[in-house]
Image (cartoon, rainbow, N blue to C red):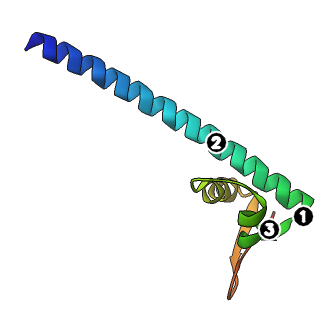
């Protein structure tokens, strides 16, 4: 029983470390995605549609949406929902 508890304790530490590492890596990826989005907007007269961003930027696994959220939280962009599209503009 003591050996099992010791092994389980090690597994908990390994899982916790892996999770913290994954969160750190995800934050880094989101920050990089935000930088790509910001750079694209700057080079595109400060505005683009969500469809344009999806087409032009190769961001996988919801990183586009996470990056937009990051920029919106930092008050770097404005998001306007128009009738048939979503417009993103630099502040």
Identify the residue at the far left of this view: 1
> Dot 3 lies on which element?
strand
Q: Are the two marked residues, 3 and 2, in contact with CB atoms closer than 8 angstroms?
A: no
| Residue denoted by label 2 | 29
Identify the residue at the far bottom of this view: 83
| Residue denoted by label 3 | 89
Q: Left or right: 70 with respect to 46?
A: left
Q: Left or right: 58 with respect to 3?
A: right
- The C terminus: image quadrant: bottom right
Q: Give coordinates of residue 9: x percent, y percent.
A: 24, 19
Q: Give coordinates of residue 6: x percent, y percent.
A: 20, 13
Cα separation, mark 1 vs mark 2, equals 22 Å
| Residue denoted by label 1 | 44
Residue at image point 29% right, 22% down: 11
- The N terminus: image quadrant: top left
Q: N-terminal of the two: label 3 or label 1?
A: 1
Q: Which quadrant of the figure has residue 71? A: bottom right
Q: Crowding at label 3, few (<14), some or many (≥20) Cα neighbours within 10 Å?
A: some
Is 89 situated above or below 84? above
Query: Which mark is in front, 3 or 1?
Result: 1
Residue at image point 84% right, 52% down: 39
Query: Which mark is in front, 3 or 2?
Result: 2
């Amino acid at each position: 029983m003591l050996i099992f508890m010791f092994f389980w304790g090690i597994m908990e530490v390994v899982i916790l470390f892996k999770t913290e590492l994954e969160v750190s890596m995800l934050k880094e990826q989101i920050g990089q995605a935000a930088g790509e989005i910001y750079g694209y907007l700057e080079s595109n007269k400060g505005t683009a549609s969500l469809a344009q961003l999806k087409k032009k930027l190769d961001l996988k696994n919801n990183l586009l949406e996470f990056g937009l959220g990051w920029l919106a939280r930092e008050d770097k962009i404005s998001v306007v929902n128009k009738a048939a599209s979503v417009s993103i503009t630099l502040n």
